[in-house]
Amino acid sequence: MSVTIAFATQLEQLIPCTMKLPERQPEFFFYYSLLGNDVTNEPFNDLINPNFEPERASVRIRSSVEILRVYLALQSKLQIHLCCGDQSLGSTEIPLTGLLKKGSTEINHHPVTVEGAFTLDPPNRAKQKLAPIPVELAPTVGVSVALQREGVDSQSLIELKTQNEHEPEHSKKRVLTPIKEKTLTEPKSPSMSPVPPHNQSPPTKDDATGSEVESLQYDKDTKQNPKANSSVPASLAQPVTTSNASETASGQKIAVPATSHHFCFSIDLRSIHALEIGFPINCILRYSYPFFGSAAPIMTNPPVEVRKNMEVFLPQSYCAFDFATMPHQLQDTFLRIPLLVELWHKDKMSKDLLLGIARIQLSNILSSEKTRFLGSNGEQCWRQTYSESVPVIAAQGSNNRIVDLSYTMTLEDYGLVKMREIFVSDSSQCVSAVQQKPSSLPPAPCPSEIQTEPRETLEYKAALELEMWKEMQEDIFENQLKQKELAHMQALAEEWKKRDRERESLVKKKVAEYTILEGKLQKTLIDLEKREQQLASAESELQREKKELQSQRERNMQELQDSIRRAKEDCVHQVELERLKIKQLEEDKHRLQQQLTDAENKYKILEKEFQQFKDQQSNKPEMRLQSEINLLTLEKVELERKLESATKSKLHYKQQWGRALKELARLKQREQESQMARLKKQQEELEQMRLRYLAAEEKDTVKTERQELLDIRNELNRLRQQEQKQYQDSREIASGKMDGPHGNALEEGLDDYLTRLIEERDTLMRTGVYNHEDRIISELDRQIREILAKNNASN
């Protein structure tokens, strides 16, 4: 089973007005759970134009079709959430019951899929009582869920995503993006896999669409030549491709003819206007030009609605191509083959309809004015720009104009394609050539000749070449700074445009919300007017009922007074009757009290007689034995009850002790397993940390050694120059040696030269880089010995 998240639109509608986004650029991502595995896609920052690579997460299932059908019936929906940090902005549910229908055998022949654009709903929409969003503004996400049996050929796992966004003139917007694969092997630990599983084969060209054929070709080329440059001959060129794993594709150049030029052709289909059809159209533009290296069609997206007497700017209409070809071949192709742009009408209810075709003559740009600009490496480049409006001719019926298309195309010539990059200038090479041949120099002239023509010396020429090289490097550095400044300004402008689009979207959203609130307010005002009328009618009804109640109250008061008078008379009569009853009861009371006194006297006499009889009976031994037997019987019953409770407690404690032993053994085993798992995880983390540390240490070591080698090479060049100069001075001194009054001056020159050689040798030795076995130190020692020998000979 695999789940692919391909695209998303209108995500800014999910941001509530009360939500405060973080000050830093927020990251958004999609999250879902696939058979117990938590899966997220690569984060993206722009909700208005979400730009993320399609990703497929797949998991292998061992089951039967019937059991899997029952499971999908129980787990009938897959929830996908759009998240910002730990907060869910919206979610959608993809039904899974359609994958395995009852009695269907499709799964045995080909994969079954559920795919489409699903609407994202904000959380707690019912509780928040939010108004419904129009269909064209509803946030959606494109999802494909596929289920296939192993061994059945599946469709391509590499898809094409073409993005034609309107960006600055130098940006490259045609992107071929392979879908990232996530193969989930165990719960909660999805792993990344950039290639399909071993049991899935890529589609052939017979059963693949045009976009899949192109992506197949792209995948084949990248496998055969993983370091191919984007600047290749037109017969092999692909459009400018970017992906997360192909940023290092410019390390090696492809061999091209020596006369080939590096061109960049870009076209921007700006707008369409002057519609001649009587009904509005929902259109996209589509074109293809194989000369640029790809036969795959390029389309604008999303479709835009065009009506009469209006001009509509097309979204994602900019596309640029990098290719290498010969100028005469480019001119011949542009003259022979025009660019055909197709106008399609998109209809959700029926098939897409081809309305017309516009012919763009690409040779027009060759006759436009050329402007010069500096390339990324400071080289001189040429740019030609041409803008025009062309009619779109109906594809069927008469050749009538449907609409006008405005476009702008640019052709940039970066010069000859270089086989490799050379970072050392010609002047520096000349200096090196002069320095590497000290033995072939002619004998030095006398000092008088050197003074008369100083510009002819090799030292002066080398210094002049060095200064010229410095000036050229300064110019290159200034150009690079200007390019960086321009890039930063363009990035700031793009960020400002992006922020402006976000603010505009939020303003539109708030205006829509305010419109909804205004409608609610109007409805509330109408309800209030109705309620006011109802209150007025209710008030009049209340006055009428109040009068009726007043008259009813007066009648009730009269009736109440009559009933009170009758009740008083009844009460007086009842009181007389009660008084007669009380008098009769008092006479009965006196009679009963006399009878009670007589009964008490009789009771006292009988009680005395019973006490005497009881004393007589208690003195007998049979009564004492009977009382002791009763006490012992009670003690026996109490002891038997205690014995029974003790037996039950013993059995209960024995059962509890057995259960406790079993629980202790199970806890020990579980603790051992968890300890082993933690130990294994810690070992894996330590191994990964060790590998990362070794890689970082090796990288730092290589960088440090490279810098040291560069410093040593610069030092060697400087010492080679000094050695050459010293050697030449010694030759001049040797050749200019004479007798007479010039002898003392010569000896002073030798002493100064000897002192300078000793100082240079000591300076090199103190650096710690050289020792007595190095060639430079040995040469200095030899020259010092020669000068000492000459001084001794002259003395």
Image: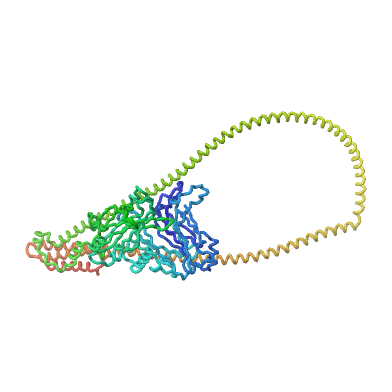
Q: Is residue 585 left or right of residue 565?
A: right
Rendered image quadrant of residue 710: bottom left
Count of numbered circles on the image: 0
In front here: 640 or 21? 21
Rendered image quadrant of residue 181: bottom left
Residue 453 in sight: yes
Note whether 634 is above or below 512 in the view shown. below
Rendered image quadrant of residue 640: bottom right
Residue at 24% from the left image edge and 67% from the top image edge: 257
Q: Is residue 691 left or right of residue 251?
A: right
In front here: 748 or 592? 592
In front here: 98 or 12? 98
Q: Position of residue 208 (x, y in %)?
A: 40, 66
Give the residue at the far left of this rendering.
740
In front here: 791 or 87? 87
Q: Is residue 582 left or right of residue 316?
A: right
Residue at 17% from the left image edge and 61% from the top image edge: 462
Residue at 83% from the left image edge and 58% from the top image edge: 631
Q: Position of residue 50 (x, y in %)?
A: 40, 55
Q: Check the picture and name the quadrant holding the C terminus.
A: bottom left
Q: Position of residue 182 (x, y in %)?
A: 44, 63
Q: Position of residue 118 (x, y in %)?
A: 46, 56
